[in-house]
Image (cartoon, grey):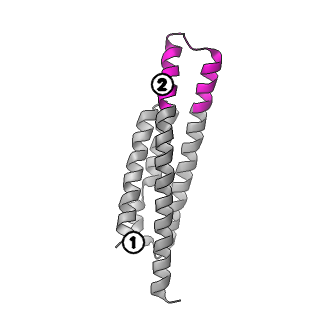
Amino acid sequence: MGAQQRASDARNAGATRVADQIKTLTKFIYLLGGVAKGIEAVDEAARRNEASPAVLQQAQQNKNTVKTSLQNVRDGLDKLEIDFRNTPELQPYYIKLAGVAAGAADAEQQAAANQFDRAGRSLLNVVNRLTDVLLAMRY
């Protein structure tokens, strides 16, 4: 297999991984929207002393699940960045990719501060960056 074919194969594999991240993130953002609305409603009910202990416990479990999921998202994006940085055929695209894990880390911090809507918006920025990388890889 020639160098040109290896480069093409690496680029295709890299593009597939970026596309998979986009799919995962968009599904997560969709689910986060519903969960965030539910958490906000429970938090508001708690402020008015109208939430049962069971509802409060479920909301806390949902918050913890979101936070853990965001950590997993960040870990996956960290690995993607490292792989692009360390694969010679993908290094030209690393410049556009660099920082997406930091965007996920921002979302993680926002979720830790119960700012779930802001966390979702941060992830939308990550999806936009990943899409730009994917577009750059087409050419």
Q: Which residues are magenta?
A: 36-62
Query: Would residue 85 be seen by someone viewing this image from the given angle?
Result: no
Measuring from the top left, give residue 89's x and y in whole percent.
46, 76
Q: Name the disc covering residue 40, or none.
A: 2
Identify the element where label 2 is drawn. Answer: helix
Which one is nearer the viewer's eye here, 46 or 94? 46
Residue 57: name its quadrant. Answer: top right
Residue 92 badge: 1
What residue lies at 46% left-to-right and 67% top-to-bottom?
A: 15
Does the magenta portion include 56?
yes
Q: Is residue 56 above or below residue 27?
A: above
- Name the residue rendered at 39%, 71% in the picture: 92
* Residue at 46%, 80% in the rendered image: 7
Residue 85 percent coordinates (x, y): 48, 67
Q: At label 1, which amino acid type do we have?
A: Pro
Residue flagged by tag 2: what amino acid is it? Glu
Dot placed on the residue nearer the N-terminal end, 2 or 1? 2
**Pair 2/1: label in front:** 2
33 vs 55: above or below? below
Visible in this render: residue 29? yes
